[in-house]
Image (cartoon, rainbow, N blue to C red):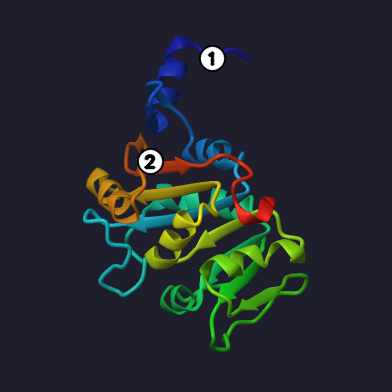
Amino acid sequence: MECSQGSSARLERSLPKVTDSIGSYPTDAGEYFRELVSGFAITASLVSDQHGSTVSSEGSSSGLGNDTDRSLLVALRRQAKVILTSGKTFRSDRYRFPKHADLAVLSNQELDISVPDGQKLILSHQGYQQALTDLRPKGYKRVHVEYGTTGIRALVEAKALDALLLSSRHKSGVLALAMELKVEPILLELEDLYVGLMAWQPGSNPLAR
């Protein structure tokens, strides 16, 4: 059934707009992010405040994002077979087990978390890059990394990622965080969120070798 011109206009007004190098157009945020990240196997993300800080007053990333940012995180997590994080991030963000993926944690301490049936918890003690590299022999080719800035910087310097996504409710937050990590992302603007996308040539990460 065809929509009338008035119905189409109302639909466009109800959808958030995305502005990128092509232009500005209305789209569903969840669908947009799913398509945006679908071509990347090894991804990482960070959310920040207006100053580029990835830690809120609560000592974690809590409160930095919004519903649109959660849609981005859901898209990244759902395409991954394993989520890789550090022990510090695990504890500060009070991690729960991912719904659709296994969990790998870089930590020298034991973790207090129950493992759902059919899923795996992988502990690593080998360093930021090695923890990622060691996932390939275990059969993981699609990984989403949720380290803090130190770990993400190490992976950027090692060229170990396919894509890095920086998000903030403020444009200044993405730019400040990008400067800290020494990357130059493409800036995507939604109505209530800015996303900086940095992509590398597929096959340059250690899991593809």
Q: Is residue 63 left or right of residue 153?
A: left
Can you give x and y, in whole percent of width and height, for residue 137 in the image?
Answer: 75, 64
Q: Is residue 141 above or below residue 149?
A: above
The kind of secondary structure element at disc 1 is loop
The crowding category of the residue bearing disc 2, from other C-alpha atoms within 10 Å (few below 14, some 14 to 19, many at least 20), is some
Q: Is residue 93 left or right of residue 99?
A: left
Query: In which image quadrant can residue 49 be found?
Result: bottom left
Task: Please report whichever mark, 2 or 1, sits nearer to the chain's N-terminal start.
Answer: 1
The crowding category of the residue bearing disc 1, from other C-alpha atoms within 10 Å (few below 14, some 14 to 19, many at least 20), is few
Q: Residue at x 53, y 37 (%)?
A: 36
Q: Nearer the viewer, residue 16 or 189?
A: 189
| Camera-side mark, 2 or 1 | 2
Query: In which image quadrant can residue 22 be found?
Result: top left
Q: Nearer the viewer, residue 156 or 80?
A: 156
What's the residue type where badge 2 is placed? Pro
Q: Residue at x 45, y 10 (%)?
A: 5
Q: Quadrant of the N terminus?
A: top right
What's the residue type where badge 1 is placed? Cys
Q: Which residue is mark 2?
A: 185
Q: Is residue 197 above or below residue 101?
A: above
Can you give x and y, in whole percent of width and height, for residue 13 in the image?
Answer: 37, 26
Can you give x and y, in whole percent of width and height, for residue 86 in the image?
Answer: 50, 73
Q: Residue at x 30, y 48 (%)?
A: 174
Between the residue at mark 2 and the residue at mark 1, the CA separation in whole angstroms equals 37 Å
Q: Residue at x 49, y 63 (%)?
A: 146
The kind of secondary structure element at disc 2 is loop
Q: Which residue is mark 1?
A: 3
